Image (cartoon, rainbow, N blue to C red):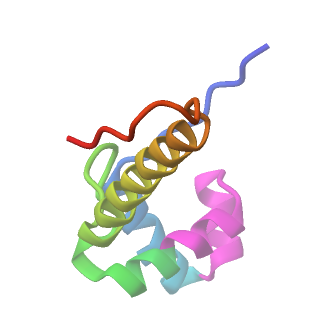
Amino acid sequence: MKQNRKKYTPEFKREAVALGLQQGYTEAARILKINPTMLRRWEKEQREAGSQAFPGKGHQLPELEEIGRLKRELKRALTDIEILKNRPRGLPLLLC
């Protein structure tokens, strides 16, 4: 059976981090009924990314977008290499 994950808005995360800084992570997590580890992770992300923290689904940081693009490009290149390795030896190599 598939378990649905809770989704929290960026505003909720920011307010939760502020509450955690004010009252302590364990107490804030108990009040908000979330895991203290999650609250600490949100605080770390906010500290590192500042105003760009919690971009939401589909809105990644530019660095993460670049990493994703490079991974897709690498996967394509590796597939092309594998195809070229496995071609019959008598066939000429045709490059576009």
Residue 37 lies within the magenta run: yes
Residue at point 33%, 70% (across, down)? 53
Q: Split into 4 quadrants, where in the image is the N terminus?
A: top right
In this view, the residue farthest toward the front is 90
Magenta stretch, overall SS? helix
Above or below, 25 against 16 in this view is below
**Residue 33 locus on image (x, y percent):** 66, 51
Q: Split into 4 quadrants, where in the image is the C terminus?
A: top left
**Residue 38 locus on image (x, y percent):** 63, 63
Quarter of the view holding residue 13? bottom left
Residue 10 or residue 73, whichever sits in front? 73
**Residue 90 locus on image (x, y percent):** 53, 32
In this view, the residue farthest toward the right is 1
Above or below, 28 against 21 in this view is above
Residue at point 38%, 65% (across, down)? 67
Relative to 46, 22 lies left or right: right
Residue 39 lies within the magenta run: yes
Quarter of the view holding residue 64? bottom left
In this view, the residue farthest toward the top is 1
**Residue 92 locus on image (x, y percent):** 40, 36
Numbered label tally: 0
Above or below, 40 against 96 in this view is below
Residue 21 or residue 92, whichever sits in front? 92
Residue 42 or residue 32, whichever sits in front? 42
Range of the magenta residues?
A: 24-42
Residue at point 51%, 81% (across, down)? 44
Residue at point 57%, 81% (across, down)? 23
Relative to 88, 63 lies left or right: left
Residue 65 or residue 61, whichever sits in front? 65
Above or below, 23 against 29 in this view is below
Relative to 47, 84 lies left or right: right
